[in-house]
Image (cartoon, rainbow, N blue to C red):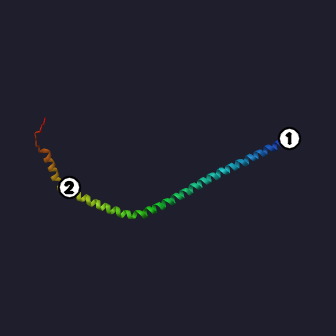
Amino acid sequence: MAAQSSAGIQTLLNAEQEAQKIVQKAREYRTKRVKDARSEAQKEIEEYRQQKDQEYNSFEKEHTSGNKAAEEQADKDTQKQLDEIKQIGTKTGPQVVEDLIKAVMTVNPQVPDRKV
């Protein structure tokens, strides 16, 4: 009877070890599936990001072309105004400096009126 009991215990131990192996394989399989799902999701996210970047760039290119012409015109107008200001400065600059020096150097002393 002891031998039969010992054989039954050994069978149960073997079955338990086999069950542990099956559970371990299932865990490994689940872990692998999760990793695969993460990498696939990351790949899809990157593809989506690239697609949206392309859409944004094409939208930006399409809508900024009109702005380019306006920017160029504004740059031309600004440059023209700057040139006019420089020309006026070149023309009247020496006279302004002379007037400033004259104003600083010419002293007109006056006696203040004291009313006490």
* Residue 106: percent from left, percent from top: 11, 45
Figure label count: 2
Q: Position of residue 112 (x, y in %)?
A: 12, 39
Q: Is residue 28 left or right of residue 41?
A: right
SS under mark 1: helix
- For mark 2, give the secondary structure: helix
Q: Residue under circle 2?
A: 89
Rounded to the nearest whole Å, what is the CA distance between mark 1 and mark 2?
A: 115 Å
Left or right: where does residue 21 sit relative to residue 110? right
In the image, residue 47 lies at what x, y percent?
54, 58
The kind of residue on which mark 1 rests is: Ser
Q: Residue furthest right?
A: 1
Above or below residue 13? Residue 83 is: below
Q: Which residue is mark 1?
A: 5
Sequence order check, earlier mark of 1 and 2 = 1
Q: Is residue 14 above or below residue 58?
A: above
Residue at the front extreme, as displayed: 116
Q: Position of residue 115 (x, y in %)?
A: 12, 37
Residue displayed at 28% across by 59% down: 79
- At 42% from the left edge and 63% from the top edge, which residue is drawn? 63
The residue at the far top in this view is 116
Task: Locate the C terminus and report the quarter of the image it occupies.
Answer: top left
* The N terminus: image quadrant: top right
User: Foreground residue, 48 or 114?
Assistant: 114
